[in-house]
Amino acid sequence: MTSSIRLTPLDNAVKHHDHAFHQIVIGLAGHAEFEIEGLGGTIAPLSGCIVPTSHVHYYEGIGDNRQLILDLPDDAPSLTGAHRELARLFDAPRYFTLDDPLRNYLNFVVQEMSQPRHADGELLATTFLSCLHARLAPDFHPLASGRPLALDAIDRYIENHLAERITVGDLARLACLSEAHFSERFRRHTGLTPYQYLLRRRLEHASALLRGAAIPLSDVAARTGFASQSALSHAFRRHYGQPPSRLRRNGATPLAATHHNID
């Protein structure tokens, strides 16, 4: 299956789904709100988000808006063969802002897509992914010097705001760092992206609630920052390999997460 690029507005109503391919959404006009399995963010013009395959995401277009959307299956030429390293972009959800060179390339892609006979979409997608990967892949940058991350303060913030939408920007501000710098240092410090760490904390708290009082799953989801009961169940299955109802029924500690569930 090949990649596809499309230009489209998002509905002015909250929708959610997941799909069997990766996706990149970039704002061209107006705004849109996203939440990708508990990680929230705003898509403004010339900024975007990465949605890995099978990740439940909620989204809503705000007023007049227009997005460029790339749909990228696992076996797309832009993510396999000589380009397989680019698949690392989809290790976890994230939000990003385009720099000037990428903004110029985005303008070219938009203009090219408006032509009756435009350039090959796979080639356009591969070039964009290559440039984005060079900017976002944390292993291409040395660990910046500076004081250690105050993980205790980050944990307290997450615990105090667990029922709310928490963004990478919120956590980065605690550390007085830019989002990109914070994400890089956090991954090297913990071995996890901020999203992976936040999701793990949400699931740990959800597990504790499920082993305690008989609280409805919808309330457990609300208390731990999941957008819905179905979003909690989906994340629980991916992380622990079993539905939350089984944990409640057995009253036991969930199975350890498999290595691929939280990536």
Image (cartoon, rainbow, N blue to C red):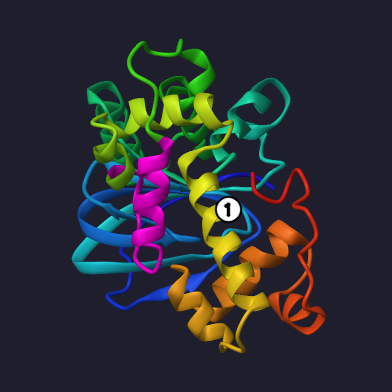
- 46 shown above or below 67: above
Whether residue 156 is in magenta: the answer is yes
Whether residue 231 is in magenta: the answer is no
Query: Quadrant where the C terminus lies?
Result: top right
Q: How many marks?
A: 1
Residue located at (59% from left, 39% from top) = 91
The answer to whether residue 183 of the structure is visible from this angle is yes
Q: Secondary structure at mark 1?
A: helix
Front residue of this view, candidates 206 and 185 = 206
- 141 shown above or below 221: above
Quarter assignment of residue 14 = bottom left
- 198 shown above or below 8: above
At which x and y percent is residue 106? 31, 34
At which x and y percent is residue 138? 49, 23
**Magenta segment:** 151-169
Q: Within 10 angstroms of label 1, few (less than 14), some, or many (20 or more) residues?
A: some
Q: Is residue 76 left or right of residue 218?
A: right
The answer to whether residue 227 of the structure is visible from this angle is no
Quarter assignment of residue 132 = top left
At which x and y percent is residue 159? 41, 58
The amino acid pointed to by label 1 is Arg
Residue located at (36% from left, 30% from top) = 182
Q: Which residue matches tag 1?
A: 200
Q: Is residue 49 left or right of residue 261?
A: left
Q: Main secondary structure of the magenta part?
A: helix
- 83 shown above or below 32: above
